[in-house]
Amino acid sequence: MLEIPWNFAAIPQYFLRFFPAALMTLQITTLGIGIGLFLGFLAGLMRISTYKILNIPSYFYIWIIRGTPLLLQLFIIYYGLAVVVNIPRFPAAVLALGIHNGAYIAEIFRGAIQSIDRGQKEAALSLGMTEWQTMYRVVLPQAFKRAIPPLGNQFIIALKDSSLASTIAVKELLLRTRQVGSSQFMMMEMLIIAATYYLILTSVLTLITTRIEKNLSISDRRN
Amino acid sequence: MEKDMIEIKHLHKYYGKLHVLKDISMDVKKQEVVVIIGASGSGKSTLLRCINFLEHIRSGKIIIDGEKVERKSKMIHRVRQEVGMVFQHFNLFPHRTVMGNVIEGPVQVKKESKKIATEKAERLLEQVGLSDKSDKYPSALSGGEKQRVAIARALAMDPKVMLFDEPTSSLDPELVGEVLNVMRNLAKNGMTMVVVTHEMGFAREVADRVIYMDDGKIVEEGDPEKIYQDPQHERTRAFLSQIL
């Protein structure tokens, strides 16, 4: 009879031991997303500005960040900058994830804002609203709503990408998995635990974004 | 009907190299209802949008209620408050209720209190026959209802003049009447109106003057009966025979 080479029975007893690492993953992700949202909103607005002094820096930011791997960006911040400024592992990971996601989120916001019908802006202007009022009273509320699904998607990517922090020895899920897995000779078992945690976290993220989408859809009702 | 509400002098408008409005001069007197007709591409909507500075003009003068409008943003914002605009596609704010749409201008632009703006909005919604819809979102309204809300929204700013850009063109035929009725009442109450429309019945009944545009120029203007019965220009005749 073929013997199963893994000891799946050991999974439950190890499962909770990964909890602190999962928390670390969640921390890197939420802080990274926070920075990403801030940078992305700023860069997105700058990107659609007609002022070159705002537009061009944003263009280059997005171009460079989207055109290079996150792992490389992380190494630049952690190893490359080390000569000038020594950024500890955790903030380096958060910063890299934030800057990286900012570029993608900028494009999400830009797309959402530009997808709002021109007539909306014209209607607002025709009431005598200023450009700024038009933006924050009429265009942005609609754009935010439209940005939620792609943002949710981006958050999930960010969560999974946070595993790259393991390469600079941040004690998050994947690093913990490799440590325990190799010391206990149970790599597959521990990887399954990590996968379960990731699945739980991404599912929660999906649930939250779906809930927000639903709450924002009251204005679409036809009764 | 003494003074001019709108005076346009030698207006030229280009889209890139395309010369879309060619030396337009016209005026609209106070309390006058002017209907602009013409084939699509004749520049009639563009002309209307120029009055509200939604389009940049190359040259020419636009004088609203005796005041020449300069291309300074402050002045344009003020003029836009006095010039109400109704769009072909309604352009209601989908994220706000009917009431939210109507009070948006007064509260945000005129800084009226919400209470006063709401009271006024209630009167306006009654005027357009939509008192019972104030809590609804635009997505729950028919096209005719949407357009009537859009009219109420524009009126909430107490404009001196109302511009209508093909207000019934995107409506199902059975919904056109309710919008025209609201407009008819507005005209009756002395509102100065400039209307781009193909509704000949409305033009005949309500308009004091009809302007026919073709290829970026005003070809002919005058009393509606006269234009319809006895157009002076070949192009006007050809256009009218197509749509009547």
Image: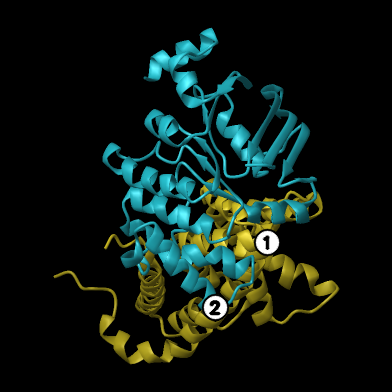
The chain letter corresponding to cyan is B
Q: Chain of mark 1?
A: A
Q: Residue furthest front?
A: B2
Q: Secondary structure at mark 1?
A: helix
Instruction: Tell me residue A185's x, y (percent).
Output: 40, 81
Which residue is nearer to you in this view: A14 or B147? Answer: B147
Which residue is nearer to you in this view: B142 or B31? Answer: B31
Tell me: residue A177, above or below residue B33. below
Real-space Cα separation, disc 2 to disc 1, in angstroms:
30 Å
Locate residue B90 relative to residue B194 in the image: left or right. Answer: left
Q: Residue furthest left?
A: A1
Residue at 52 percent of width and 51 percent of height: A116
Q: Amino acid at mark 2?
A: Thr
Instruction: Tell me residue B66's x, y (percent).
Output: 75, 46
Q: Amino acid at mark 1?
A: Trp
Disc assigned to residue A30: 2
Q: Colour of chain A?
A: yellow
**Can residue A157 be seen from the camera position used here?**
no
Which residue is nearer to you in this view: A37 or B2? Answer: B2
Disc assigned to residue A132: 1
Task: Kindly check if marks 2 and 1 are in contact, taking CB atoms under 8 A apart as contact.
Answer: no
Locate residue A61 relative to residue A201 in the image: left or right. Answer: right
Q: Secondary structure at mark 2?
A: helix
State the image quarter where residue B222 is shown. Answer: top right
Which quarter of the rendering shows the N terminus of chain A?
A: bottom left
